[in-house]
Amino acid sequence: MAETEIRLEIVTPDSTVYSEIVDHVIVPTANGKIDLWQHHAPLIDRLEPSDIKVLKEGKVEYLAVGAGFVEVYAEKVSIITDQAILVDEDNYEEIEEAIKRAEVALEEAKSSNIDEAQLQLLEAAAKFEHARKIAKGKSS
Amino acid sequence: MANTRDIRIRIKGVKNTRQITRAMQMVATSKMKKAQEAAKSGRPYALLLADVIVSIADEFEEVTQSYYVERPIKHRGILVIGTDKGLCGALNSNLFRELNEVDSSAKFVSVGKRATQYLSRTRKDLLADFSLPDKPTFSEIRKLVEFLLNSYDEGRIDTIEVLFTSFINTLRQEPELIRLFPLNDLDSMTNKLHERFGQPDHVAPKDTREILFEDRDAVLSEIASLYLKQEVFQLVLEAQASEHSARMVAMKTATDNAGNLIDDLTLQYNRARQAAITQEILEISAASFSE
């Protein structure tokens, strides 16, 4: 076991998206991006919809995540989010379409009388789609 | 004894019925598997969420956010998860029997037509009824959960409890009443959660974590409502798995019974046929004797 290992776990309501030992990981939080290595102090923070950069055995991986929470504890980074996707499995056309769909839905919602919670949900969805695009852009 | 033609028609009818029940059994089997899978895949999320709630709450001297404080219970709020369709054995009646012990001040929210029918027939205080599709998504649960939270916020109900059929195995499903809100006893909540997911020896990590966000009450309420949503989602999926497996068993029994009936009828038919043949021979030979 190398010295700089930390377990990263990303779970969504539908599944466990990622659960592996990694070297270090850069996570977008409400207070900016934080780089988490082994022996990091335990913490809890909000997760911002954006990209997560994972460094594992010299390789770099990107994931897009939605809003949620991040907890660092006992050499483990746990990320609870409503959506997450590995960008390697993603492709540009799909992302562009998804962004369009999300934004159209958001615009429609804004013009019609829709309740606040639903609007927030659509906004979160749109943000997530943008995060997908950013993450994809960085990985290629 | 019935004549052969009548018996033949009956056999045909029973065969048709058996075909239908067998098809329903197969559909229920595949649906049950899917619902079970869906319920299982959400478990890590629920566990992690519960751990985070506990560790956040541990950091504070006192949690005053209303989701975490027990208040005097005037009206219990109970969500009853029934089924939309029948033909699933004693599932619903077992479920509703649990309600006999609940006192009349309780208020109800129902999911599924059968639950709605039962609650209105027994004149319980029904706040709202929801219907969910087979294999609902997380977002389809939202309306239901928001209604529960609103009722809780406005003080119409003082607890949020869920009555559902828990899935033990394919042959056994038992009604269970779980209290989700208020989250005043977090330790027992996580323990129960781990027990339900088959990890009874779990020890909650007790150590301080630095909390980096400022709006603590907002986060606490947000994460509690997330937890509620997740739990309700899980329980709905589990109730559906139970429904489908109960239906599967009921339909299997029906198919088997139809098979037995067909065997009996076939025997009867053969006897009747044989009797008719014998009768005919007798008549012919009697006629030839008398000549």
Image: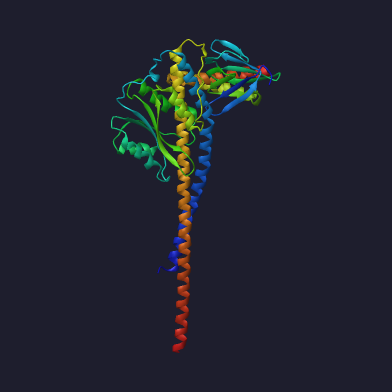
Residue A34 visible here:
yes
Task: Check the image and report above or below for A36 versus A93.
Answer: above
**B216 or A133, which is in the foreground?**
B216
Which residue is at the far right?
A58
Residue B206: image x %, image y %? Answer: 50, 19
User: Residue A105 in the image: x percent, y percent?
Assistant: 51, 22
Q: Quadrant of the N terminus of chain B?
A: bottom left
Q: Quadrant of residue B7?
A: bottom left
From the top left corner, tell me how far across and down residue B230 is, in percent: 47, 27
Q: How many marks?
A: 0
The answer to which of B101 and B120 lies nearer the viewer is B101
- The residue most toward the bottom is B291
Q: Does the image show residue B83? A: no
Quarter of the picture containing the C terminus of chain B is bottom left
Residue at horizontal 42 percent and vertical 69 percent from the top: B3
| Side of B176 relative to A133 (left or right) | left
Looking at the picture, tell me which residue is in the foreground, B271 or B198.
B198
- In the image, taking residue B116 as reference, residue A57 lies left or right, namely right
In the depicted structure, whether residue B229 falls above or below residue B122:
above
**The quadrant where residue B96 appears:** top left
| Whole-percent x, y for residue B175 in the image | 40, 38
Q: Residue A73 occupies which quadrant of the picture?
A: top right
